[in-house]
Image (spheres, grey):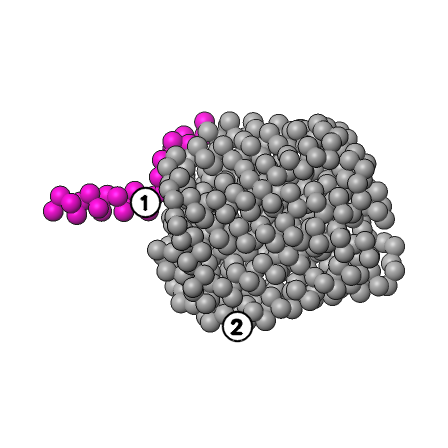
Amino acid sequence: MSSSSNGFSVLRHRNFRFYLTARVLGTLAVQMQNVAIGWQVYSMTHNLFYLGMIGLAQFAPFLLLILLAGHAADRYNRRLIVTICLGVQLLVGLALLAYTTSGMQVVWPVFAVLVLFGSARAFMGPATQAILVNLVPQRDFSKAVPLSSSSFHVAVILGPTLGGLLYIYGPKVVYIAAASLLLVATVLMALVKAPPQASNREPATWHSVLEGLRFVLSRPIVLGAMSLDLFAVLFGGATALLPALAHDVLHVGPTGLGLLRTAPGAGAALCSVLLAFFPITRRIGLWMFGGVAVFGLGTVVLGATASFVVALVCLLLMGAGDMISVYVRHLLVQFETPDAIRGRVSAVNSVFIGASNELGEFESGVTAGWFGLRPAIVFGGAVTLGVTAAWIKLFPVLARMDRFPHHEKELAAQAEAKTT
């Protein structure tokens, strides 16, 4: 790692400050809602399959819309797209509040509302990923990525904890607080000045929509990095089962569940703060694969333990390992992608991330129904370790990668300048 003494200097850019604040508040609200939804659904049904359905309800519309959303992020103003999507998430929070206030004892309305949330997230994901490089000069981008990630994970830390604490007073309080935060986030994002971006006016044909996918498939480094996250986290997605783990194995209430949901974000945030000051510049392939291996090993131990403290430590390490992998992958993808197709490539990346998270949650619910709660978690972690080993063999160029491609070009240019 190389040291940087001014990791927060990127905050001098107004657009980045407003974007970052809006993203943190929006993420904080969604994390609070997630705790309330998971505990509310499980306490009503005590059905592991329904916990998996929470993920599937969000992923299904996401999968259907994401490639079109990537094209939209390249053709239309990304700031406007993010603002609208935050507004839709606000409506989702209000709908959850209305559902809870009504006293209904069926859970299908929750899944219906989450379909709307998944649709908004489909359009927000590519625009959010693609807009970051437009908000700061390229020289500050390597500082903006870890700071954005660390701020995001601060929200991931605080959100579940606040959600668990507020749930003591009932889910209505959680949804009111979340809706308030989303309202502020929407206003802040609307105040961001539209940053310059390479505009693509190509109509939304199948050829143009699939341009991002063709680009990813043509770049083994990008394909390997994205698919590693997809298959590793797909089988290691124990997050959906945390309500059942907290209730049935660790014997803690919603506050304990909030702490469990907080731990991965805490590990990721601590790791990303270190990355902001000591960014990874050498042996990036080994760092990425090592981060995924730590995630898999932590998942195995999480499924095997009945100790609340050990479970917290495992989730903390899982978050740190995942952050290292995300950091390397994000820089690889963004530096390798032309701005004119950045939204569509980000859409493909969002498919991989969404599949690994929400579809992974559904997979966890299904396998827990088959094998039992704890065996399903251990199985998922073991598969993650197996995927890591397989991808080292399938993508040796990625495993052996020493520096980011743009660093290699800079070094080559400097060497050429010295010889002339």
- Disc marking residue 131: none
Asked whether residue 409 is drawn in magenta, I would say: yes
Q: Farthest residue in the front direction?
A: 5
Residue 142 at x, y percent in the picture: 40, 51
| Residue underneath mark 2 | 191
Residue 365 at x, y percent in the picture: 73, 39
Q: Contact (CB < 8 A) between labels 2 and 1?
A: no
Q: Is residue 5 visible?
A: yes
Please name the residue shown 80% across and 65% down the image: 98
- Disc marking residue 407: 1
Please name the residue shown 46% across and 58% down the image: 132
Q: Left or right: 47 with respect to 186?
A: right
Quadrant occupied by the N terminus: top left
Asked whether residue 89 is drawn in magenta, I would say: no
Q: Quadrant of residue 278?
A: top left
Which element carries disc 1, helix, strand or loop? helix
Q: Is residue 66 visible?
A: no
Q: Left or right: 359 with respect to 321?
A: right
Q: Left or right: 399 with respect to 311?
A: left
* Part of the protein shown in magenta: 393-420
Depth check, front residue: 316 or 346: 316
Depth check, front residue: 287 or 221: 287
Please name the residue shown 75% across and 53% down the image: 165
2 or 1: tag closer to the N-terminus: 2
Q: Quadrant of residue 313?
A: top right
Instruction: Give the amino acid at mark 1.
Output: His
Instruction: Give the amino acid at mark 2.
Output: Leu
Majority secondary structure of the magenta segment? Answer: helix
Residue 153 at x, y percent in the picture: 58, 50
> Dot 1: within a 10 Å radius of its alpha carbon, few (fewer than 14), some, or many (20 or more) residues?
few
Total count of labels: 2
Depth check, front residue: 303 or 405: 303
